[in-house]
Image: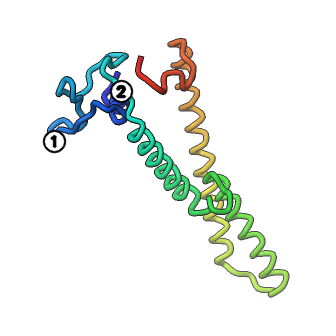
Amino acid sequence: MDREYRLKYCRECQNRAFDLQHGVICKVSGKPADFDSTCPDYKLDEWARKKNEIEDARKAEEALKEETLGMQVVGIKSKKGAGCFIMALAGCITFFTIGVLEVVSLWVVVVFVLGLITFIIGVAKERREKAKNRKVDSALDDLGLEEGEDSSQPK
């Protein structure tokens, strides 16, 4: 078990303390967490858990905002969706400028290409995430665990 995994629990334990040299440590032992599967001194700190949930939600919202180029406010939830939206917008603007104004504009092509690039990056990211999830699922199957089974307390 690695330190990051242990810290996930220590951040929400009443027995946590902070040391300048080691970071988060256990008040009981005075050392960084070193349990293998279960910490006998673990006591849930509801306030810390709620604070961490709020912070994690804020980080997720910020990541979504960055990934969708701010388009999450209109319901777009992925880079692939943002790329499709940009390409559709460029298509509508092209239709308007050619059909109504009878002008061909180079900037519309630039916007379309940016949308296409955003879409391609989104597709590539989605494929990487699916491959990563397959590896995680395979590892969990090898261990005989279900995803999320060990999420509330280390065993």
Residue 13 pos. (x, y %): 34, 31
Looking at the rendering, in which quadrant would you find the N terminus? top left
Instruction: Answer above or below: position of 151 versus 126.
Output: above
Q: What residue is disc 1 on?
A: 20
Q: CA distance from mark 1 to mark 2?
A: 23 Å
Query: Residue 152: percent from the left, percent from the top?
Result: 47, 26
Circles 1, 2 touching at the beta carbon (< 8 Å): no
Precedes in sequence: disc 1 or disc 2:
1
Q: Residues within 10 Å of mark 1 (few under 14, many from 20)?
A: few
**Residue 145 versus residue 73 in the image, above or below:** above
- Residue at 63% x, 62% y is 73
Q: Is residue 99 left or right of residue 129?
A: right
Q: Nearer the viewer, residue 120 or 60?
A: 60
Quadrant occupied by the C terminus: top left
The residue singled out by tag 2 in the image is 43
Q: Amino acid at mark 2?
A: Lys
Q: Image point 60% across, 50% down: which residue?
A: 122
Residue 7 vertical position relative to residue 113 in the rendered view, above or below: above
Residue drawn at 42 percent across, 45 percent down: 51
